[in-house]
Each structure stands twice: as structure tokens, then as C-alpha cells.
Image (cartoon, rainbow, N blue to C red):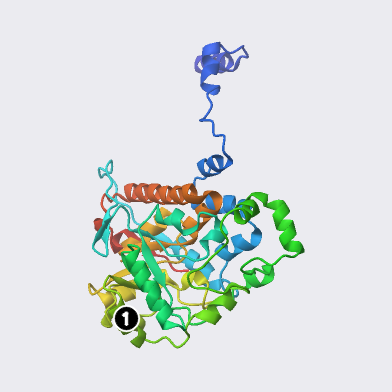
Amino acid sequence: MSPDVATQARYVDEVTRRRLPRPSELAPYLRTGPLRFWPVERRLASAATIWDLRSAARRHVPRAVFDYVDGAAETETSLRRSREAFARIEFVPSVLHDVSQIDTSTTILGRPSALPLVFAPTGFTRLMHQAGEPAVARVTDRWFQLYLWNDREAGLDLVRRARAAGFSALILTVDTPVAGARLRDVHNGFTIPPTLSLRTLVDIALHPGWWFDKLTTDPLQFAVFKETGGTVADLINRVFDPTITIADFAWLRDAWDGPIVIKGIQTVDDACAVVDAGADAIVISNHGGRQLDRAPVPLEQLPSIVAAVGDRAEVYVDGGVLGGADVIAAVAMGARAVLVGRAYLYGLMAGGERGVARAGELLRKEAVRTMQLLGVTRVSDLDVSRVRLRDR
């Protein structure tokens, strides 16, 4: 054995020889994390991604409620394709830049925003958590979602109430002339209010906390649906107006003197039409895949619509966004901002207002980290040179 080999052998023998550890050496292994006594705190603290919040939500609420949020229409192909589109994003980083300070701020409808991110208006949130919409409103900006009803006078009254309540913008959702076929709801027998059945009784046993919260707080009430009973699709088809046309937008423009965002745009022609009619912004959206299955993928439609609209209106996008990297990718492809729905609803189901705040925090942290690794320090510097959409 050569001297060098012998020396190495002695060194290995010395460092691997068994011995009792010194007390000072044990100290680093005996440290404990912060004690969290409340289950909701433990759930949220352990969530490192939106997917973790989704897993926590799935355990915490009845299956029918979770599936109402998580599911989409028919075969759920639109939802899968939207998520696959973000998976096809390839970032193009640039190195050797000072990325110690990152500015994620932008402006949305002329107002400053800490992130190019909007929590999309959603419905039936008190089914997900008893705190409902106020838990979301306290974490984000206040935009009011409007569907046009058969009863136009009632819709006009709702617009007036939204203005009096201090909402800063109106989102007119136009992709729901009738309800999409959300088959998870059908298979779960999901109705509003829930119908008492053997499945409901099993849910009570498995999720007593959720049921306790529902039964010991004010009954569910909806500004849109004065009479409940039936599936969500039944309620939509009873109230929403399937005759809505571009002419109805002019009526709304007269009734609302603030910014109007048109949500549910999926083609260049429709984008140009609503902008010509006076829309301040549009959301490229297929309603999270919950309406027309196999609809266009919003992220794929984004570049052509941005090019067609130009600077006449702000262009937002949603669908399949489950991380801050998705937000950064969409902005680099031309979106002024990105809307998320399921991402924060998973947080709402997992932990109420704190869960919504946790979702926002996770999205922000991932957005910052993505910009740092891209070598971009300001949202305004994101452009198509930083991303490309790989072939399928």
C-alpha cells in the first residue's frame, strides 16, 4: 500500500470510528420549529406551493365542495390543456445581474399594484369557508363581477349597490349564456343548499368542522339567486340571460361610470369588438375550463390578442395559473396582469382568510424567485425575449 493510500485509509478510519457525541454537538439537532397549536396554522405553514394548499383543501372540506372548485366541464380537457400550456413554457434566463432587489409592482387600470396579479371574482365562496367573499376582499382589491340577468332592473340595482359599496371596477363575464356541463357536480349530487342523503350524512361524519361552521353561522344567501334549490347549473339557467349581445354592453357603459373589464374573451375578433365598444380591459379566459370544453387555451391566444388590441385596452389572462412562475410567464408573453381563481380558493378552503393570504404569499415569493433566476429586476422589463412556448 502506497503512503498516500495508507494516509487516506487512516483518515477514513478516524472519521468513521464510533464514539459518544458531545452535548455541544447534539444542540443543533435538538432545535424545534415554532410551536403551532391551531390546526389551521399547521396546515398553512406546511404548504410550500399552491398544490400543497390544494391537498389541504381536499382533506378539509366535503368532496362535493372541493370538486365544485377543482373541477371543470365535461371531459375537463380545457382545464388540462391550460395547465399543459404553462408546463410548455421555457424561460430564457440571463446571468450576472444584480438581482438583490426585485420590483414586482405595476399598474392595473391606472392604479398601483404590488404584483401583476388579480384575485378573480368567484361565486359561492361561503360554501368553501364560512368567511366567504369578505375573507378575499380583505386580502385583495375590490372588483365586482356581474352577469346580466333576465331581470335587467335587478341587475341595474346590483350595479348601483356595487358602486355605493366602493367597488372600483366592474367585471362583466360574458361566457356564460348557459351553464357548462360540470359533471363532477352531477356525479356528486351537488345542490344548493345540500340535499340530505346517505352521502351527505357520511360527509357530516368525515368533515364535522365544516358542517358545524355552516350550521352555526348565518344561512347561505346570494345576491343573484333569490330562490335556491337544484344544481349550480339549474340556478344559472334560471337567472342568467342567454340573449345577451354586444348591444347590452352599451347599456352597462351608461349605468357604470368606472372601469369595465370584459371577462371571457377567447378570440381576436371578440377582443376587438368589445374594445371598440368601450371596454377598458379584457380577460382572455375560458372560465377555467368550466363552460365550453375544448375551448381555446387562453395562454396560447394571448400573443395574437395583445397584438390586435395594442394599447387601446389592458389585456389580462387566466386559466391554469397555479404558481408565481406562471404569472411571470404570462406577463412576459404580453399580459398586463394575470387572474387567479382556484389558487386562492384552495387557500380559502384550507384556512379561510389566512389561507387566502398564504396563497398570495406563495404566489409572490415564487414570482420574485422566478424574476431573480431570470435576471430581471422589474416587471416592466419582462418581455417575449424571456420566454418561449415549446412545441407539444
Residue at screen point 37% across, 47% down: 369
Q: Position of residue 206 (x, y in %)?
A: 70, 52
In this rendering, the answer to whether 175 lies above or below 43 is below
Residue type marked 1: Val
Up/down of 148 relative to 23, above or below? below
Residue 169, percent from left and from top = 32, 67
Query: In this view of the protein, which residue sits in the foreground, 200 or 163?
Result: 163
Q: How many marks?
A: 1
Q: Which residue is mark 1?
A: 274
- The local crowd at label 1, few if under 14, some if 14 to 19, many if 20 or more residues have their Cα within 10 Å, is many
Q: Quadrant of residue 328?
A: bottom left
Identify which residue, 1 or 124, lies in the foreground: 124
Q: Position of residue 290 (x, y in %)?
A: 53, 72
SS for callout 1: helix
Q: Position of residue 114 (x, y in %)?
A: 30, 52
Left or right relative to 99: residue 244: right
Instruction: Inspect this view and state whether residue 119 appears.
Output: yes
- Residue 66 or residue 219, whichever sits in front: 219
Residue 31 vertical placement versus 202 (above, below): above
Left or right placement of residue 126 versus residue 166 in this view? right
Residue 179 in view: no
In the rendered structure, the answer to whether residue 43 lies left or right of residue 152 reads right
Q: Quadrant of residue 195?
A: bottom right
Residue drawn where x is 63% and y is 14% of the image: 18
Residue name at image x 64 percent, y 63 percent: 64
Image quadrant in which the N terminus is located: top right
